[in-house]
Image (cartoon, rainbow, N blue to C red):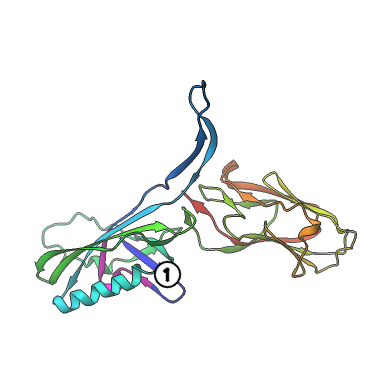
Amino acid sequence: MDALIKNDEIEVTFSSMGLLLTDFDDSSPSLVLNRRSVRNRNGYINYGAVHSQKNITLTGVFLARDPYELEVIKDEINGLISNDEPFYITKMIPTREIYEYQNPGETSGFDLLEIPHTKYRYRYKVIAENSIQYDFLGNHKGGLLTRFSISLITADIPYGLTEPTDESINHYIYYEGTAKCSQLEHPWSIKLVAGENQPGDFSVSIGGKVFTHRSVNEIKKGDIFILKGVETLYNGKNVNVRTNYAHFVLTPKNKGLNEFSTNFKGSYEILNKVEFYI
């Protein structure tokens, strides 16, 4: 197993640093219930629940030639992980089976750090929760063997999230995630480009939620609307006063097919789309 760490400045895998990752434990996110009791009534009144955070624990080992290199490697790990800025971490999966039956002496073995890996479909935005734990295991034929353990928590969104993409829209927006993705939680937007002159009143519906725009001014061919959920731009200018302030939510219901409909005449695109995974 391996992991990829990425921020604004670096992109590095654990294996490239000589770190052998033995476990990548990403638990399900914790739930915070919103409920209250009522006098003389059994049970609770449920007002829903939200996911608060996800805990991720990484464990592994590394070899150092001598005590000096051991300290150097620890400094590199500390500088990479124990940072005051969140970063992205992606689980990497071996691209071939590493457990193979063979006859004695058939091969000379393999290097676990050299096994090809591929990125999993989503990543986490995380920050270190506690100090990194190091446990010296003793001398090994390759040097000094040390185990490490790293505790991370999600920095904002308590889900795995895919890399952002821009996609054209026809009648549906396809969503493969397992958790709902609201425009209030992630800044995805809908782009509308007018294909012809048309009235200033139009609406857009996604999954039953309806956005409306009202104006006596005619929309010209080539005009652009960006629907952000918290803001609507018309050719780059804020026009919130002409809208109903609606925001959209992508859901995994109906096999991820979020129905899209509008009476706006032109082309449609979803920008900065991501998918959330519990």
- Residue 123: x, y in percent? 44, 60
Instruction: Determine the residue positioned at 41% across, 52% down.
Output: 54
Q: Quadrant of residue 273?
A: bottom right
Q: Residue furthest bottom?
A: 68
Q: Residue furthest front?
A: 39
Q: Secondary structure at mark 1?
A: strand
Relative to 152, 257 lies left or right? right
- Residue 154: x, y in percent? 43, 57
Name the residue carrying label 1.
6
Q: Nearer the viewer, residue 104 or 92?
A: 92
In the displayed structure, would residue 124 be above or below residue 30?
below
Instruction: Determine the residue positioned at 45% across, 58% down.
Output: 121
Relative to 14, 46 lies left or right? right
In the displayed structure, would residue 78 be above or below residue 275?
below
Q: Is residue 203 a member of the stretch shown in magenta?
A: no
Pointer 1: residues within 10 angstroms few (<14), some, or many (20+)?
Answer: some
Instruction: Determine the residue positioned at 29% across, 74% down.
Output: 76
State the extent of the magenta-drawn residues as a range: 12-22
Q: Quadrant of residue 65?
A: bottom left
Instruction: Determine the residue positioned at 34% across, 68% down.
Output: 82
